[in-house]
Image (spheres, rainbow, N blue to C red):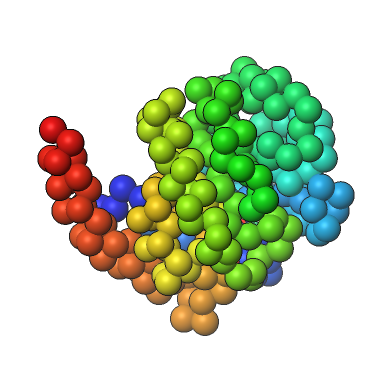
């Protein structure tokens, strides 16, 4: 069983068959479901609200992870909690009171994560990471699915991994945008432990079940490759 977690993003789903596709993702071994919330202001696109979470809560037992790409995340927390959300990812960008937002999420009993855009340095996480369950390195500019993975984010993922090992080793490192079976091995080698993928899972012409199998196979191959290297690195340091 792979230690890397998969979080299919429903932004890439066929909304006419959303429930069915999420059930397929769960049966295919998804670890959580990623829900992208956009307000047309923080990002230039509109997506979905808490009603979708309420509906999904009835069809899956998987944790529902809410990625808030909105100008005022605090305003929406209560209604998303009432709808059945399990965790929140809020952006560092545009939030003058990030610590307060994170504390509110924790007070509501939910897991808290902070997302950073491609142009934002991972160093901004230094003071907030001890309060987080997850960080999310955006590997595209947020707002749309089906975008091309930005390879320039790979060294940043490595730096974020180092920062987390130093300050909060239990914190997960997620990546979001352009993740498929080609880019998954790259981000996992760089230190990602949670992969968000929309179009590569829900848009696979062979269906969600086949897409999940392909992802798992790619991750298993990556771990077979990386584990001996990690082991020898640890042995060298002893
Ligand atoms: C982008 C969203 C992503 C999106 C990823 O702003 O945060 O979660 O669904 O889509 P793909 O996997 O198609 O790049
Ligand atoms: Zn997202």
> Quarter of the image holding residue 203?
bottom right
Q: Position of residue 66 (x, y in %)?
A: 63, 43
| Residue 135 vertical placement versus 181 (above, below) | above
Q: Where is residue 157 in the image (x, y as percent from the top left)?
A: 48, 49
Would you say 23 lies left or right of 38 here?
Answer: left
Would you say 1 lies left or right of 161 here?
Answer: left
Give whichever of 160, 197 is nearer the camera: 160
Give whichever of 9, 157 is nearer the camera: 157
Residue drawn at (56%, 44%), measured in percent from left and top?
136
| Residue 204 vertical placement versus 226 (above, below) | below
Give whichever of 13, 227 is nearer the camera: 227
Residue drawn at (54%, 56%), measured in percent from left and top?
153
Task: Tell me which image quadrant ligand 1 sits in.
Answer: bottom right
| Residue 226 vertical placement versus 210 (above, below) | above
Would you say 122 lies left or right of 212 here?
Answer: right
Residue drawn at (43%, 25%), measured in percent from left and top?
167
Q: Position of residue 71 (x, y in %)?
A: 82, 40
| Residue 153 vertical placement versus 110 (above, below) | below
Whether residue 20 is visible to the viewer of this picture, yes or no, is: no
Q: How many labels does the image show?
A: 0
Residue drawn at (48%, 41%), measured in percent from left and top?
160
Give whichever of 135, 80 is nearer the camera: 135
Q: Where is residue 139 in the image (x, y as percent from the top left)?
A: 58, 57
Question: Where, quadrant-wise, is the C terminus in this rendering?
Answer: top left
In the displayed orientation, state which residue is furthest to the bottom. 205
Would you say 199 lies left or right of 218 here?
Answer: right
Whether residue 151 is visible to the viewer of this picture, yes or no, is: yes
């Amino acid at each position: 069983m792979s230690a890397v977690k998969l979080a299919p993003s429903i932004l890439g789903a066929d909304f006419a068959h959303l429930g069915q596709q999420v059930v397929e993702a769960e049966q295919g071994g998804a670890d959580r479901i990623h829900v992208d919330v956009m307000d047309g202001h923080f990002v230039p696109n509109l997506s979905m609200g808490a009603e979708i979470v309420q509906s999904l809560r009835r069809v899956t037992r998987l944790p529902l992870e809410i990625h808030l790409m909105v100008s005022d995340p605090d305003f929406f927390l209560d209604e998303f909690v009432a709808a059945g959300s399990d965790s929140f990812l809020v952006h560092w960008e545009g939030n003058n009171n990030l610590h307060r937002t994170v504390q509110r999420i924790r007070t509501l009993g939910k897991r808290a994560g902070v997302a950073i855009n491609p142009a934002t340095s991972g160093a901004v996480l230094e003071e907030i990471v001890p309060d987080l369950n997850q960080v999310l390195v955006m590997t595209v500019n947020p707002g749309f699915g089906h975008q091309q993975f930005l390879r320039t984010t790979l060294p940043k993922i490595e730096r974020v991994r180092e920062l987390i090992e130093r300050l909060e080793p239990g914190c997960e490192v997620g990546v979001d945008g352009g993740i498929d079976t080609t880019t998954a091995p790259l981000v996992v080698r760089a230190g990602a432990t949670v992969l968000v993928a929309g179009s590569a899972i829900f848009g696979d012409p062979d269906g969600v079940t086949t897409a999940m199998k392909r992802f798992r196979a790619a991750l298993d191959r990556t771990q077979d490759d990386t584990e001996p290297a990690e082991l020898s690195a640890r042995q060298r340091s002893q």
